[in-house]
Amino acid sequence: MKRYLSMMGNYLLYLAVIILVIFLYNTVIDPVLGWGQFGKGTNIPIQVFMVLVITIALSAIVYTIKYRLLKQTPGSFWRLCGFSPISPSFSVHMITIGLAFTLLNAATMKLLLYYNITTFNEFTEEYYNSVPFPYLIVSSVLTTSLELILFIGIMFNEARKHVPVFWPILVIALIIAALQPGGIAMQLLGVVLGFIYGYVYARFSSIWSAMLIGIVFNISLFGMKKIGWLDSMENMSEFTLIVLATVMGLYLIFSTLFYWRKPKAR
C-alpha cells in the first residue's frame, strides 16, 4: 500500500505544480500580456507553450527540494526522461502508430458530426486558426515535446518506481485525458494516447519513442487540415468512418499489446 500511496503522492505533487502555473498565468501573466485565459482565445498554442516551460522549470526545483527533504541523492533531473536513441525499425513503427492515431482521431471527429456533436471539431478548427500554419507546426513539435517531457519523462517516471507498470500508466492516461480540451470524445482518445505513450516508453525508456508518436500525430493532423483532407472526410459515409476508426483502433491496440507483452525493465 505504501508504494501506491507514494505513486499517487508523486502524481499529486506535479499536478499541483501544473495547477499553480495555470493559476499564475491566468492571474498574473494574462492581465499583462492579454493573451486570454488559459485554453481560450486566439493564442492557445502560445499559452500552452509558456505554461509548459514554466511548469518544467518549476518541477526541476520541486524535484530537488523533494529529494533534499527525503535526505536522498537524486539523479540528474534533465536525464530523468531518458534521451537514449531507438533503432530505425522501431522509429518507423512509432511513426505508423502516430499516423494511425491521426486517422482514428480524424474519423472520430467527423463521425461525431453525424450525431450533431460538434465540440471536438470546433476545438480543432479554433486551434488550427489560432496562429499561421508554419507557427502551428513549430508549436506542435515544441509543445508536444514539452508535454511528453512533463507527463511521461517527469511525472510518470517519478511515480512508477516500485509498482507494477500498469497502474502508473493508467493514472497518467487519466491525467492526460482530464487535461484534454474539446469534450468527452477527445478525453477518451486522450486515455488511449496515454496508454500508448506509457507502454511504448516503458519498453524503450527513451522519450524519443513517445515524442515520435506525438509529433507525427500533431503534424499529420494539421497537415491533413491544411491540404483539405480533414474537411473532405465529412463527405465520407458513416459506415466508412466507422470502418476506418475500427481498423486504426485495432492497429493501435495490437501495437500497444506488443509492448505490454515485453516491457523493458529499468
Image (tube, helix red, strand yellow):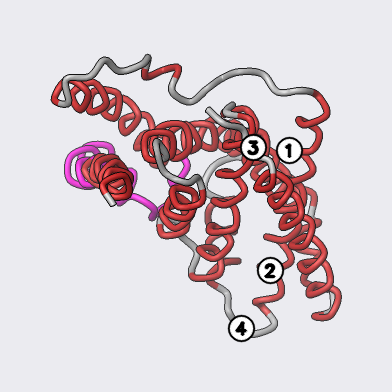
Horizontal and vertical percent position of residue 12: 26, 47
Residue for badge 1: 94
**From the viewer's perspective, is the residue at label 3 or at label 1 nearer?**
1
Residue for badge 4: 116
Q: CA distance from mark 3 to mark 4?
A: 29 Å
Q: Earlier in the sequence, mark 2 or mark 1?
A: 1
**From the viewer's perspective, is the residue at label 2 or at label 1 nearer?**
1
Horizontal and vertical percent position of residue 55: 31, 33
**From the viewer's perspective, is the residue at label 3 or at label 4 nearer?**
3
Q: CA distance from mark 2 to mark 1?
A: 21 Å
Residue sitting at the far left: 69
Residue 117, quarter of the rendered image: bottom right
Q: Which residues are magenta?
A: 21-45
Residue for badge 2: 108
Q: Earlier in the sequence, mark 3 or mark 4?
A: 4
Q: CA distance from mark 1 to mark 4?
A: 33 Å
Crowdedness of circle 4 by 10 Å Cα count: few (<14), some, many (20+)?
few
Quick check: can you spot residue 168?
yes
**From the viewer's perspective, is the residue at label 1 or at label 4 nearer?**
1
CB within 8 Å, label 4 to label 2 = no
Left or right: 131 in relation to 254: left
